[in-house]
Amino acid sequence: MSEVILKVKDLKQHYKIDQGWLKQDSVVKAVDGIDFQVMKGETFSIVGESGCGKSTTGRTILRLNEPTSGEIIFEGQDITKLSYEEMRRLRRKMQMIFQDPYASLNPKKTIRQILLEPLRVHNLFTPKERLEKVIEILEIVGLSEYHIDRYPHEFSGGQRQRIGIAKAAILNPELIIADEPVSALDVSIQSQVINLLLKLQKELALTYIFISHDLGVVRHISDRVAVMYLGSIVEVSKTEDLYDNPLHPYTQALLSAVPIDHPDEVKERVILKGDVPNAVNPPMGCTFHPRCPVAMDICSKVQPIPTVHDGNHSVSCHLYN
Ligand code: SF4
């Protein structure tokens, strides 16, 4: 049985919006009390539409945004309690890959400077060893020493994301949170970067939290998947169970839009009515009820709690209570 590397308990990320002196401040519940755990060595994906809170979840786990409340237990330690300095040291073990590789790389620094920096900040190795490490990681991500004195703008989007991955992996972390790491790339490049992530996971024994809106990519890379809607996790399951037997009506609608693999397969598209409601004033009861094609009376009154089906498949929906 694999060991739990990360446990997230009742995590909330609420933002106050100043409405001016005449009105009361509003609160956006970007993440509203989520629970999940990640096993060592797995890829745990978080999916959902834009604005569902998945990227905020990733940033909050790394405390790039301070959580409003809840626990983030990494390797047995609640990291919400750590000081700034303790957290800075811990970031060696927890790294992030960003969606836009160009924005995450300093345009004024060469690749040598960009990749040496984390080793220097964490005071690792001698100067000679650091350079060897940089050349080694460049080769692992499919670049070479030849590229070391170039600037980010001299690379293609795919190469820049390889550098972003090298920057995250050079510290040999335990956990990498990859936030939409391929969505800014051409489709032809996406699979190369995904294959690189899979290769690195094997070679460096990495654990990934993979954040994406692309259910096709998520199916390919994940061991387990959590589906988020309006700041809450509505379903969590092993990847094959989720894709073969989605339980939550929102997951069913999302999956109905994924292109099918086989020409003989027929799939009925579920079109959701309306837009995602405002997180400042989420609907009562099940927050999905205004858009749910099978909503019942109880759904607008009572918030469903997660229930577990067939071992490990968890869903928050009154249809299964
Ligand atoms: Fe639909 Fe009700 Fe289930 Fe929410 S609880 S997803 S509204 S059936």
Image (cartoon, rainbow, N blue to C red):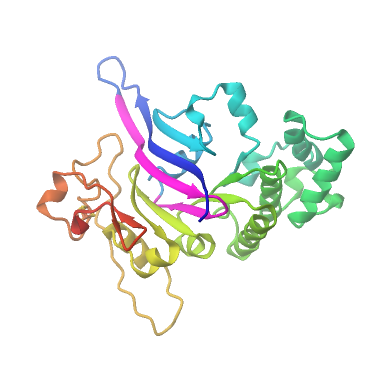
In the image, residue 198 sits, relative to residue 87, either above or below, namely below
Whether 231 is among the magenta residues is no
Q: Residue furthest bottom?
A: 264
For the question of whether residue 69 can be seen, the reply is: yes
> What is the x, y in percent for residue 139?
80, 54
Residue 189, quarter of picture: bottom right
Screen quadrant of the C terminus: bottom left
Horizontal and vertical percent position of residue 24: 25, 20
Percent coordinates x, y for residue 150 in the rendering: 81, 44
Q: Nearer the viewer, residue 49 or 250?
A: 250
Task: Give ligand 1's quarter of the image.
Answer: bottom left
Residue for point 73% across, 55% down: 141
Q: Residue furthest right?
A: 128
In front of the other: 274 or 194: 194
Residue 307 vs 13, above or below: the answer is below
The dominant secondary structure in magenta is strand
Residue sitting at 27 percent across and 60 percent down?
Answer: 249
95 sits left or right of 78 in the view: right
Residue drawn 71% across the image and 53% down it: 159
Residue at the far left in the pictured view: 297
Q: Which residues are magenta?
A: 26-49
Q: Quadrant of residue 27?
A: top left
Residue at the front extreme, as displayed: 1
Left or right side of 193 for 68: left
Q: Is residue 108 in view from this perspective?
A: no
Vertically, is 188 above or below 111? below
Of the pair 20 and 318, the residue shown nearer to us: 318
Q: Position of residue 119 (x, y in %)?
A: 76, 35
